[in-house]
């Protein structure tokens, strides 16, 4: 099973698009709300080199933003 982590914030519209896309494709994911968990912000920056959200980690492949094409590739859809 694929492990998917989404680093997001509550006010991010692109984060909502990522979650909607995953739900539509029946992909389970773990959401890390950076507004509530500042410690995980460091983790996200280390993994991605990015400070903006969303950052999606699909089995170690890091995808910045709502990139449907890259997410489909990483999820083998």
Image: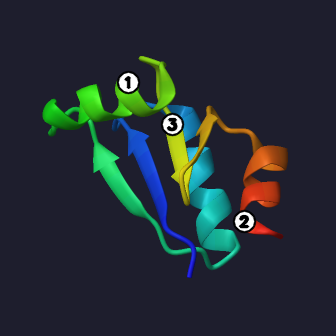
Q: Which residue is mark 3?
A: 55
Of residues 54 and 73, which is closer to you in this image?
73
* Distance (Cα) linking label 2 and label 1: 22 Å
Mark 1 or 3, nearer chain start: 1
Q: Residue at x 14, y 33 (%)?
A: 39
* Local secondary structure at mark 2: helix
> Which quadrant of the rendered structure holds the C terminus?
bottom right
Task: Count neighbours of disc 3 (C-alpha within 10 A) and say few if under 14, some if 14 to 19, many if 20 or more.
Answer: many
Place of residue 67 in the rendered image (x, y in percent of width and height, measured from the top left): 74, 39
* Distance (Cα) linking label 2 and label 3: 15 Å
> Which quadrant of the rendered structure holds the N terminus?
bottom right
* Local secondary structure at mark 1: helix
Observer-side mark, 1 or 3, equals 1
Place of residue 24 in the rendered image (x, y in percent of width and height, measured from the top left): 68, 71
Q: Which residue is mark 2?
A: 75
Q: Is residue 7 left or right of residue 40?
A: right
Q: Residue at x 36, y 55 (%)?
A: 31
Does 41 appear above or below 27? Answer: above
Q: Is residue 44 left or right of residue 2?
A: left
Mark sitting on residue 45: 1
Q: Residue at x 45, y 49 (%)?
A: 6
Place of residue 29 in the rendered image (x, y in percent of width and height, measured from the top left): 46, 66
- Asked which quadrant contains residue 9, the reply is top left
* Distance (Cα) linking label 1 and label 3: 9 Å
Mark 2 or 3, nearer chain start: 3
């Amino acid at each position: 099973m694929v492990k998917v982590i989404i680093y997001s914030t509550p006010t991010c519209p692109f984060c909502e698009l990522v979650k909607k896309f995953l739900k539509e494709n029946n992909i389970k994911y773990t959401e890390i709300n950076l507004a509530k968990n500042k410690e995980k912000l460091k983790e996200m920056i280390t993994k991605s080199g990015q400070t903006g959200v969303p950052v999606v980690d699909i089995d170690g492949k890091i995808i910045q933003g709502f990139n449907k094409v890259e997410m489909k590739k990483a999820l083998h859809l």
